[in-house]
Amino acid sequence: MSVGQFVGGLLHGADYNYEQWLDLPEQLDKDLVYMREAEINVLAVGVFSWSMLESDEGIYNFEWLDQCFDRLHKNGQKIILATPSGSKPAWLSEKYPEVCQMAADGIRQPHGGRHNHCRSSVKYREACVRINTRLAERYGTHPALILWHVSNEYNGIPCFCPQCLAAFRDWLKKRYETLDSLNAAWYTAFWSHRFTSWEQIFPADPSIHGLMLDWQRFTSDRTIDFFLAESEPLRRITPDIPVTTNFQMPDVGLDYHKFAGYVDIISWDNYPKWHCAPDDGPEAIKTGFFHDMCRSYLGKPFLMMESGPGANSWQGISKKKKKGMHLLSSIQAVAHGSDSVQYFQWRQSRGGQEKFHDAVISHLGTDDTRIFREVAETGSVIKKLSAVAGTDTKVQAAVVYDFQNGWALGNAQLQRNTGKNYQKECIAQYGAFWKAGIPCDVIGPEYADFERYRLIVFPMLYMLSEKTAEKIRAFISHGGVAVATYLTGIVNESDLCYIGGTPGNLTDVFGLAVEETKTIAYYEAPEFVMNGNNWKATHYADRIRLCGAKALGVFTSSFEELPAVTACEYGKGTAYYICTRTRQAFIDWFYRELCKKHSVDSCVLREIPAGVSVRERGGVMFIMNFNCRETTVSLGENVYRDMLTEESISGTILLPPYGIIILAKKREPGEK
Ligand code: GAL
């Protein structure tokens, strides 16, 4: 399902807090003019409007929203309507204190802020269903409505109130059935932690890893359950309007791989920290990783529901975007699979916590500002890319990023705890593909179909369920290429260590068993040799026993000449293992070689300069320069059509700092 069909192309829009401007109607009039100028075709409204929609229990006031709908519709814009549960009205907290979360010490949190309601509260759920029912009944058939935006940026902040604890115990009963099997899974013989009644279980004991992990899983599931409860009236009353909820940058305590299965369209809020380092390349790679994760959740285009049109006001330092960066960062989203470029927000608030967060229309209130011009320029570019809407990218490589593994690894007390950096390491592996212009998915081990890929990387997959191990075995035996690293397959899904060799259940597939994992201190600089080059090893290094694999890389004498990188043929495929953390130079070289050796589709451009990203989507090639300097790119023999200027392009091009070029392959007369 693509919402682009409603506008005949990509969406370009913003959060629109119409209700904040009711006392200044002339500003609202200007908005309509400015929106047309900036090619805005969609607005997300009602995100935090509850107290304006329902001023007291059962007292509704929809007139302002009716007006907003009708005016935008007449002006040619579509609407994404939010449900207001992200921020509760004061009367609700006053009347039903149970809607506020409770901390682990039993203290109810005061009313205020946002995103802090109890997800189990019966009263909160009832109130959400009531207001959402009204919204669906009133706006469900409005011709401007294209999508439901349920709540806003759900998170996994736990609530310890009696209703949540009871729900947690029910969740545990379903999972384990008996206390005996719970005690076995949680290994409660350790430190005398055995539970003899369900009521004794309180989820605030970091020494019981099984308990903490299940609490994290429950909290994530509870959020999904809450989402389903508040979406129910929308699904029932407006079955033809798709439903999304805006995800955030991971990791916010939710298993997004699982959550994704319950929405029609993935959307997310993208706030990179541009220009906070001298080189924007690493931030571009990280952002690409998040975009690709969003594309991979459902294997189809997503929406970038929010991004900053300028600087933010919640980061330690947020820099104004340098010339070119706004368009570049917007186009990056599209290149990675977004069907929209949307902003937070249209008009900068006059008061409240976000009054200094840049918006499309600033406090100056005019359309002749730098930010407005950049947004309008982006709007005109987006309009020319309508052919890209709804299209996908052919992908043969994937990196596994598992939220639950991140939680388990976070809870674990290893022999090296500083610098575990799970997410960073996944991004490092992904970075090799980004730099080589090889499209790469970011997938969850439980949900993804491994057989779709040629090459899958499993970085630090510390928690490996038996089911995932079986999937990996089948993938490799059918001809897949897998790469696992140190700290893979150490514990099962209950966080219990595998006995008899790691990676658990896969020692025969990888042809090795890890005997121990050494830690490397910051002053040490061990190296390994591979392909005649010396590469640095950092943080962790496995001492392994080979039982079928061959060593491709070997530690130098300072590290006992043990294998550092191995390969093992298994069935029709190959299982590689990297025993140590390495520097980026090795990662980049290693995956380039692997892709060549195993015929993973490579980029059409032979050479991609550092800091330049090349992506292909729907037959369109996006070349994006994240360097703050001009960069030359060679297009090789092919002739392309510049989609923005319609000119023919070939040979060598010079991209300005933060410049982009968007190319379609030029077809010769008669060529199909
Ligand atoms: C997002 C949020 C928006 C706004 C924005 C500011 O996380 O969804 O409502 O607060 O941040 O950057």
Image (spheres, grey):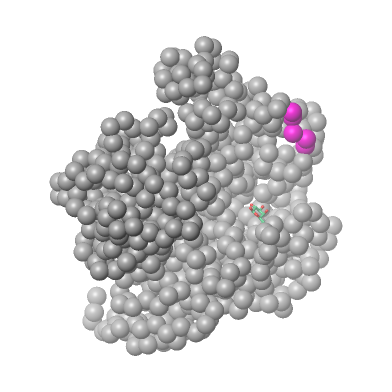
Q: In the image shown, does 402 or 44 lie closer to the viewer? A: 402
The answer to whether one can see residue 471 in this image is no
Q: Is residue 627 visible?
A: yes
Q: Position of residue 60 (x, y in %)?
A: 76, 39
Q: Overall secondary structure of the magenta stretch?
A: loop
Percent of width and height locating residue 295 = 43, 55
Span highlighted in magenta in the image = 107-111
Q: Residue furthest left?
A: 571
Q: Residue at x 30, y 77 (%)?
A: 606
Q: Eyeballing the image, is 181 above or below 355?
A: above
Q: In the image shown, does 561 or 460 lie closer to the viewer?
A: 561
Q: Quadrant of the C terminus?
A: bottom left
Q: Please check the rendered image and state whether residue 7 is part of the magenta-colored stretch, yes or no.
A: no
Q: In the shown orientation, is residue 354 left or right of residue 613?
A: right
* Residue 632 against residue 392 in the figure, above or below: below
Residue occupying the point 59% across, 53% down: 80
> What is the number of callouts on the image?
0
The quarter holding residue 178 reads top left
Left or right for 472, reference 122: left
Residue 462, picture quadrant: top left
- Which residue is farthest top? 196
Eyeballing the image, is 472 above or below 499? Answer: below
Nearer to the camera, 154 or 29: 154
**Residue drawn at 81 percent across, 56 percent down:** 351
Please tell me which residue is depicted at 29% across the width and 53% down the height of the picture.
560
State the residue in front, 603 or 382: 603
The location of residue 611, given as percent across then percent down, is: 46, 74
**View quadrant of ligand 1:** bottom right
Q: Quadrant of residue 165?
A: top right
